[in-house]
Amino acid sequence: MSEGLAKTLELEKVEGGESDHAQESVEYQGWKSMPFVIGNETFEKLGTLGTMANQLVYLTTVFHMDSVTAATMMNIVFGTTNMTPVLGAFISDTFLGRYTTIAFASVASLLGMVLLTLTAAIPKLHPSPCKENHQECHGPTSSQLSVLIFAFFLLTIGAGGIRPCNLPFGADQFNPKTESGRRGIASFFNWYYCTFTVAVMISATLIIYVQSNISWTLGLAIPATLMFFSCITFFVGTRLYVRVQPEGSPFTSLAQVIVAAIKKRQVNLLELPDKELFDPPHHSNLVTKLPHIDPFKFFDKAAVITSKDEIKSSGDATDPWRLCTVQQVEVVKCFFRLIPVWSSCIMYYIPLTMNGTYVVYQALQTDRRLGKSSFKIPAGSFVVFNMLTMTIWIPIYDRLIVPQMRKITGHEGGITILQRIGVGIVISILATTVSASIEKHRRDIALHKPTPMSSLWLVPQLMLFGLSEAFSIIGQNEFYYQQFPENMRSVASAVLLLGFAISSYASSALMTIVHKVTGRNGSRNWLAKDLNEGRLDLFYMMIAGVAALNFVYFIICAKWYRSRGTANGAKPNVFSQRKE
């Protein structure tokens, strides 16, 4: 097949669509498949978020666990669900492919939700209700606890498969080689996050209300039903999907390059021309051929052909743990180039995590009534203002601002991806500073006036954090998707979640340190249980200061970073405005 014809057909390997001797061109359905992809995602998020959002209350009120035991169990569950996507991404990119992984994980989530609903609906699967005096409250039996844990296990399996795959699977439906396809991918990331925020708002309001005020059985059955619709929606669109087949473990290839480079660490690259590197013809239809670049030249040693290396008649290396292709080496370089930017984004999550935690405590010490009515906004529902901002902003940004910016900058996304992430980081610093100012105002009123501050004063900081996420989180999703090699795109989504997990642990460690240091020798504890006795505003300012330093680090990483290129010509720095 000629090079020109290969470019015209835009070939790509798909599950069940290519034999060893023939290839089929892919027909990208683009937005035609989006109702099924986004519909599946929306119902799935409504189901999982609606199930897990109020579990702490469920464990303490229905299963009669003490607060420490319940919190510990949920911390383990949430921590595991943020770690399993790494395993799910590996299985997807190595063995099953994204479609099969999502299908399997969706069924696992559905079964987990059904089982969790049964723990509320069937009396024998949960402890008997407490007596009115609360003196006869029995905790769960071993069998009841086993059923509950197995339900959480199924939900964790589902999250491990769905979270790293659903976003790149949706982006797979667009042709990345055409301008309309690239714009479709960028727009999809925006709408994906928009539906996510809608799901969070509904879960944080309607579903929590049903669970807390009407019936736990009904409140858990609704998310389970929504998850059932998610599965149906996903499978109905099967005939439209582009299903990219994995080409083996990318982690094995990474390990081979590192091991081979270490084995040949004595090789002097300055004495070798490029022609001495092992660079056989590139036959993959999934992974783009990458150009040979200079950074991280140590790994080039893995591709150096020495007298000890042998090559088969097929053109493959006899020992892949000693001799690797230039393509393998460049994939490893691509991976290592991403690490600095990724590490700079971990610190970005900490202000978001702190705000999500302490805004609840702030709300509990404010007047949460709406006007003169007796209705009080639940403290856990204030996240709605964050999500509402994103829901309103994302369509405006995608449909109105980006087209106008595109005319000015000539960039498909209006601004580059790293610029978008940077804008989000700056807004998060501003939001944390505003949080400190509002908390100082709340504390002054609480100490010097008879009535507490209105909880609506918390809305500005929540709106700023929502705006920050609309820029930075969506930008990171798109950045990792574009910059990771094609056979590691599920890993790209898992990397984002891994960053959240690390930031959660870092946030916990930071709170523990501040709590111990500031409360030493009888001094005022910044993070006292009663916020009026603490100085949460100073804690917020400290977080803002650290975030500002991290922004400087991000700028350095972004300026240094060079976008993943192709063998036809490397792309420019994605932080600049230069056209490709």
Image (cartoon, grey):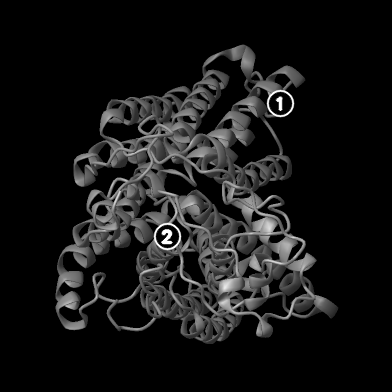
- Whether residue 528 sits left or right of residue 577 in the image: it is right
What residue is shown with label 2? 477
Of 14 and 51, nearer the camera is 14
Rendered residue at 31%/47% (across/down) = 11
What residue is shown with label 1? 137
Rendered residue at 53%/75% (across/down) = 443
Q: Earlier in the sequence, mark 2 or mark 1?
A: 1
Q: Do callouts 2 and 1 mark residues in contact (Cβ within 8 Å)? A: no
- Whether residue 442 sits left or right of residue 462 in the image: it is right
- Decide if residue 454 is in sight here: no
Give amino acid for label 1.
Cys
Residue 278 position by quadrant: bottom right
Residue 83 location, x and y as percent?
63, 48
- Give the vertical position of 146 relative to 346 (above or below): above
Rendered residue at 46%/62% (across/down) = 480
Give amino acid for label 2.
Asn
Residue 118 location, x and y as percent?
53, 18
Secondary element type, mark 2: helix
What whole-number distance in Å separates the C-alpha atoms at marks 2 and 1?
46 Å
